[in-house]
Amino acid sequence: MSDILVVQNLSKSFSSGNKTLTVLDDISFSVEEGASVSIVGPSGSGKTTLLGLCAGLDVATSGTVSLVGMKLNALDEDDRAYVRNQHVGFIFQNFQLLPTLTALENVTVPLELRGEKGFKPKGEELLDRVGLGDRMQHYPSQLSGGEQQRVALARAFISSPKILFADEPTGNLDEDTAHHVTDILFNINKEEGTTLVLVTHNMELAENTERILQIRGGKLVADRKSLTAS
């Protein structure tokens, strides 16, 4: 299989007064199509910054990111947004659902923004798959945290993304709910054959992926197969 994500000598720095803060320092790795990878490390280690650079949400100070065959640093903001819209799904810790839309409307928003038609049945099918077939017309305020994250999961898969970026997807959930959401995420991801890049500080969650990248102090300090990888 070919690589869907290639990170080469990636660094990210910020200026703070007369000082320069280096958040990521010369990181390189690649991810094959269909693989699942976790990025782990303590708070402040640069995990979320790295995820944002990989997804084209931000630009690096130096180094390159190639996503689905396109060098993101060579693209302007609009072109990076187009790449994300066409190829990328996102799951966030805080769900990021639109409060004025129903569960079904939240799920189908990405396809509506792309100008596609006839997307309602696919949204309904995905909500069924995450166990919310009877909650389609509920608003986020009428759903529990676990239910909101399952809506977010359905939304992430609605556009059949080639790669899914998940940032602490169970961070706001209790342990039992987190396990349930994790099972749904990995089951759908496997069924769809989507590449998964997951940021977490939870090693138990990380072991669900095939490979684990460990970040410490902005550097990549380990790259190993997970204990559960076959």
Image (spheres, helix red, strand yellow):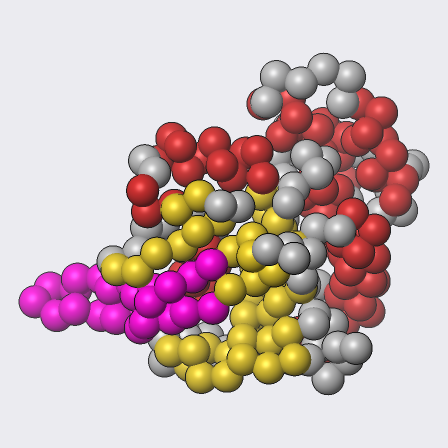
174 lies left or right of 56:
right
Where's the C terminus, which quadrant? bottom right
Determine whether 77 is above or below 89 in the image.
above
Determine whether 22 is above or below 63 in the image.
below
Does residue 48 appear anywhere in the picture? Answer: yes
The residue sitting at 64% across, 21% down in the picture is: 112
Q: Which residues are magenta?
A: 6-29
Where's the N terminus, which quadrant? bottom right
Determine whether 177 is above or below 85 in the image.
below
Q: Position of residue 196 (x, y in %)?
A: 65, 58
128 lies left or right of 27:
right
The residue sitting at 47% across, 31% down in the picture is: 82
Q: Main secondary structure of the magenta part?
A: strand
Does residue 196 appear anywhere in the picture? Answer: no
**Camera-side residue: 65 or 112?**
65
Q: As drawn, which residue projects farthest toward the front?
A: 1
- Residue 226 location, quadrant: bottom right
**Camera-side residue: 78 or 153?**
78
35 lies left or right of 188:
left
**Camera-side residue: 156 or 171?**
156
The residue sitting at 58% across, 43% down in the picture is: 88
Q: Position of residue 154 (x, y in %)?
A: 75, 42
The answer to whether residue 164 is magenta is no
The residue sitting at 43% across, 61% down in the picture is: 7
Q: Position of residue 146 (x, y in %)?
A: 76, 55
